[in-house]
Image (cartoon, rainbow, N blue to C red):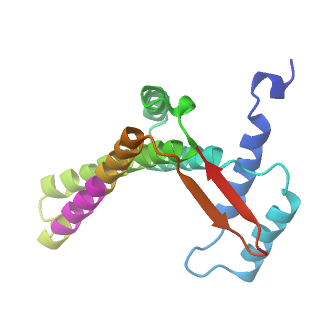
Amino acid sequence: MTDEEKDPLANEKEITKKFLDVYEKIKKEAPSTKSKKELEEYFIENKEPSISIQAFSKSLSNQVVKKIYESSPMVLKQLNNGIEDMRMELEYGNSSTIEQLLIDDIIIEFFQMRNMQIILTSFMTTKGTANKNIRFADQMVSSAQRRFYKSIQTLTRLRKTGINLQINIATEGGKQVNIKK
């Protein structure tokens, strides 16, 4: 049995991994000409098959969790199992593309919110921490909570209404990518 027969998304995962490798090297605020060129070459080289938006989003959510908990490999393995359980509970596999993107947002926001709560707790229990640092961490927790709850509310509303959603992403040259439920 070939790798592709074992995992039909293996090629897509490899393409997504290559993209993330190139993308992570870029300084987001001031990308270098070399970085832009590498990214452009990547897109030219990998025109077909394209990265599915779902695979890309899922990969990004997994990367966020990995970055937050990279110092705890045992915890990371258990968290990844929990993430897959959460995706199953939210019917990720049977969801539309937009719902899958929202589920990935929920996962990302959940872990970012928890991470900020850990930081806030650390600040509050450390003697000598400046009040402005505690207030800032508290604001970050509140902000993360709002994003988390907003993602949940959006997914709930979308599923309640059952409307068909279409997202059009126009690219340079007039090509268009349609995502439709």
Q: Report the front residue among 12 and 121.
A: 12
Left or right: residue 12 compared with residue 136: right
Task: Give the residue at x 50% y 29%.
Answer: 84
Q: Which residues are magenta?
A: 135-146
Is residue 98 rendered to the left or right of residue 8? Answer: left
Instruction: Please tell me which residue lies in front, 49 or 60.
Output: 49
Outermost residue, top side: 1
Q: Main secondary structure of the magenta part?
A: helix
Q: Residue at x 74, y 82 (%)?
A: 33
The quadrant the C terminus occupies is top right
Residue 115 shows in this picture: no
- Towards the viewer: 160 or 134: 160
Residue 8 is inside the magenta segment: no
Residue 62 position, x and y percent, is 53, 43
Residue 141 is inside the magenta segment: yes
Above or below: residue 159 compared with residue 171 = above
Determine the image quadrant of residue 141. Answer: bottom left
Q: Quadrant of the N terminus?
A: top right
